[in-house]
Amino acid sequence: MAVTTRNRVLELSEHTPAQMMVFGLMAISCWAVLFLFVAAPLMDAFFSGFLRSEVVRDGSQVTYRIAENRDDEVVTTGTFSTWALVDPRERKLIDAARAAALHPDEPRPYPAEYIFTPAIALAPLVIVGGFVLAAILTTLLPGIFGYVRQKFEREVLNAMDRIAVAQYGDHTPEEIKAITGDLLAADLRRLHDLADIYAMPYSDLELLQAALRWREAAGLAKIWRTHDAIRFYMREYFTDRYSNAVLGLVYIGAAILIIVIGIRGLKFLPATDPSVVLGALGLEFMLLITYAMVLMYGRTDEDGVDASREPRHVGAASDADAEHLLRAFLAVPRNPSSQGDNS
């Protein structure tokens, strides 16, 4: 019965605490991997190539002056805490002086030209990238590891249930299997025919067919078709539910960036520590990329118009038929003799 399908949809809509915990652990692991093996090496290469500076982040101490009217401060570097950008030639001179000194183990800090805090500057890029990478991984894995995969399967089953309700009303699982088999085996011509039969846009039915093939695939074929499932989920669920929220976050990120740039223009933020400015730029960049993805996978204006017209077509046709029947009834001439006999 249809109740069985809807119960299954409800089951897929609920995630267990274990699933959410595994997804959180995977996201944290992805943050660490992205920071250590992607973001940090890229920033190191950028500073070395663009600023011609050497990055010190091995726990050494450096001297840093935040402003001209301030004294030098001793800062301890670290991979996650503070990076110092020093002149390579000056570092060689200091290393040579250490080697020639009577006490080479005596600390002699390097003078830092810039200070960089990766936890602030790289946090937006790493956090958003970690969530995206964890979502992709949980799309491929089953069971307790399949947090996002369960969401995709829920929307596929929900779409199949809507078609079955429109065709059969109170339907059975066998009828859903029949519709599934028909969609999986349909070629281009048959898919156009099914779009007319199901009274739904062809583009929606094409995406549903691709998502069904992803659900039925296994192994490398499932990995290859993952993008089809992402397109279906983004169009059928995410863009409709969260497009306004994403747009609001874009405006919030722009407001934060304006405030940070304004404070930097007023020189409340030192020019030798660009961490906050880079963090605000990274935040707005990731939000704009997210909004661009929502626009790419969302419905176009034409699709929205077609989708809004489809449900009204059947109702309009039935109203027109009723109107024709009423006019035909009113146009039938009444028999006066019969009226007299009846009186």
Image: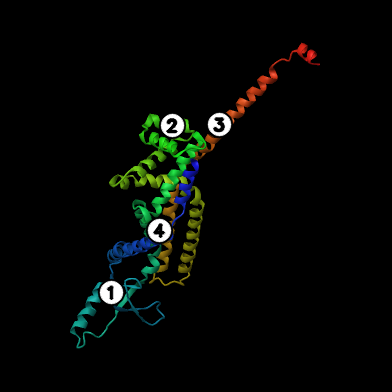
Is label 2 or label 1 in front?
2
Residue pictured at 28% horizontal, 74% vertical: 58
In the shown orientation, is residue 241 left or right of residue 207?
right
Rendered location of residue 28, percent (x, y): 37, 64
Asked if 169 appears above or below 291 in the picture, the reply is above
Disc 2 to disc 1, how far (Cα)?
A: 64 Å
Is label 2 or label 4 in front?
4
Q: Amino acid at mark 1?
A: Asp
Q: In terms of secondary structure, where does tag 1 sit?
A: loop
> Could you tell me if the residues under marks 4 and 1 are in contact, i.e. CB atoms within 8 Å?
no
Q: Amino acid at mark 2?
A: Leu
Q: In terms of secondary structure, where does tag 2 sit?
A: helix
Q: Amino acid at mark 3?
A: Val
Q: Which class describes the residues within 10 Å of circle 3: few (<14), some (14-19), or many (20+)?
A: few
Q: Amino acid at mark 4?
A: Gln
Is label 3 or label 1 in front?
3
Q: Which residue is mark 2?
A: 194
Q: Which class describes the residues within 10 Å of circle 2: few (<14), some (14-19), or many (20+)?
A: some
Residue pictured at 40% horizontal, 78% vertical: 68
Q: Which residue is mark 4?
A: 19
Q: Can I make out residue 142 in this image? A: yes
Rendered location of residue 186, percent (x, y): 37, 32
| Residue at far left of view | 100
The earlier-in-sequence mark between 3 and 2 is 2
Residue pictured at 70% horizontal, 20% vertical: 330
Residue pictured at 44% horizontal, 46% vertical: 155
Disc 3 to disc 2, how far (Cα)?
A: 16 Å
Q: In terms of secondary structure, where does tag 3 sit?
A: helix
The earlier-in-sequence mark between 3 and 1 is 1
| Residue at far top of view | 337
Disc 4 to disc 1, how far (Cα)?
A: 37 Å
